[in-house]
Image (cartoon, rainbow, N blue to C red):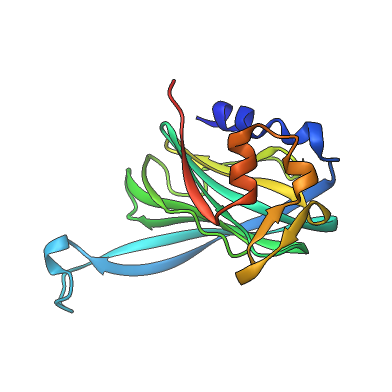
Amino acid sequence: MVDPVFEYFRPLRDVLRGEEVRIAGAWSPKPQLRYASAAQLGTGEGPYLQTVDWRWDGTVECAASLVGIAILMVEERAYWVKSQPPVAQAAVSVMAAGWAAQADSVSFGGAFHGAYPPSVPVQISDEPPASFVLGSEETSTGLLHVVAGAGGATFGLVLLPGAAVKVGRNRLWHLRNEVASRLPPELNGLLTRGRSGELAFVR
């Protein structure tokens, strides 16, 4: 699923100067008690199941300010959300909620600088972080960067230089017209209108 999304955003490299970016973070667990079955929802009564929510918290750093698009890719779809306005250092995270000490489904999601694509269930056989593959700690603006993946789903970022965007109402940014006009129409529309959306790809 990553390849078509990478190709979709590839034209950005032709219109933007790449800025070096560094990403670093670490995993941490948080034990949780959950209902043993859906029938218990809202009752406040047991039995309960001991689970662990795993979270990878990191920072994205660049010499210049940046913004980004957080993207959750699964099967033939990619859910995208624009971040908050430009900063030189931003928080990024990966979540794997509901691990129950056995091969099972967990809720997988990610976030970047105020952008939260929807989480999706994924099947994993080992406890996070062993079942997750993290991307490189070094990347560049203007291309899709994989932050983490598991169970057929992938969380990634497309980072853009802050100088290439303009912040409008409600702190929503858009790519400057002189840059966006050089992009394919669909990508132009994504980067100049709206805060979030969904891309569908046919294999």
Residue 171, percent across and down?
Answer: 65, 69
User: Is residue 141 something that shows in the picture?
Assistant: no
- At x 49%, y 54%, the residue is 117
Residue 82, percent across and down?
Answer: 60, 55
Decide if residue 163 is on the left or right side of residue 68. Answer: right
Residue 101, percent across and down?
Answer: 34, 52
- At x 43%, y 61%, the residue is 53
> Is 89 located above or below residue 7 in the figure?
below
User: Is residue 114 something that shows in the picture?
Assistant: yes
Residue 112 is drawn in which quadrant? bottom right
Decide if residue 148 is on the left or right side of residue 63. Answer: left
> Is 52 located above or below residue 33 in the figure?
above
> Is 171 located above or below residue 166 in the figure?
below
Query: In which quadrant is the C terminus drawn?
Result: top left
User: 13 or 61, which is in the foreground?
Assistant: 13
User: 128 or 156, which is in the foreground?
Assistant: 156
